[in-house]
Image: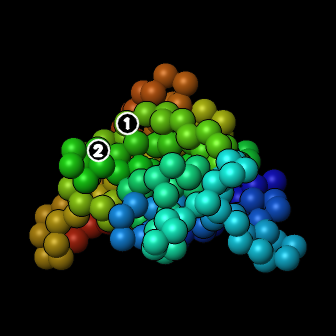
Amino acid sequence: MNKAFFNRTSSLAVSSNGYYSLNHQAVGAYLIFINKEDRSETYLCGKPDCSHTDAESPYFILESCDAYIGEAVLGSIVCFHNNIYVLAYDSETFEVWLVKISPEGSRHETLMTVGPMPSNGSYFRYVFADDNTIYMSYYDPEPAGKERTVSLAKIDLRTKERSSVYTYGGLDVSIGYL
């Protein structure tokens, strides 16, 4: 049985045989698998001849590596039925997408657009209810002391339809955990 470990700052997702880690670098993010048995860390890349990192700057993952996922929402990694899910982010268009990644990292499939987000923060949180349904919360990133809106939506992954479950507005409101 797979379980997701997450909160507003988490970058880990737990699977039956290890942990998937979402790591951020200066430009973009990448995924690492940590084996439960020996605690070894490997880039989540299915390419046998991939060097993973830049030869001149080994701290940066190559964009051609399967482990590289571009910009990602902080704490957005979830493991469900042996697949990894991450919220990808585009800082130019401010759009957020739900991306499904195979356990070995070779397949990245954009499932749907989630919505806009004004900056890369942890404004979206989600949890799987079943194979085809996720519940996703969003809170407006207004600073403390200001009115903000929080919402909870049900998303059908088959139809890509979103339906509102709950919306609330007020001073300093937030949805902390799902």
Which residue occupies 25% across, 53% down? 91
Label 2 sits on residue: 95
Q: Position of residue 27 (x, y in %)?
A: 36, 64
Which residue occupies 71% across, 72% down? 41
For the residues bearing labels 2 and 1, Cβ distance under 8 angstroms: yes
Mark 2 and mark 1: span between their CA atoms? 7 Å
Q: Position of residue 72 (x, y in %)?
A: 41, 57
Q: Position of residue 114 (x, y in %)?
A: 37, 41
Which residue occupies 51% across, 73% down? 58
Outermost residue to the right: 37
Q: Is residue 14 above or below residue 85?
A: below
Lower position in the chain sequence, tag 2 or tag 1: 2
Which labelled disc corresponds to residue 113? 1
Helix, strand or loop at label 2? It is strand
Q: Dot 1 surroundings within 10 Å: few (below 14), some, or many (20 or more)?
A: some
Q: Dot 2 surroundings within 10 Å: few (below 14), some, or many (20 or more)?
A: some
**Dividing the image into 4 quarters, which one contains the N terminus?**
bottom right
> Is residue 171 toward the left or the right of residue 101 in the image?
left
> Is residue 2 toward the left or the right of residue 106 in the image?
right
Q: Is residue 47 above or below residue 74?
A: above
Q: Position of residue 76 (x, y in %)?
A: 48, 59
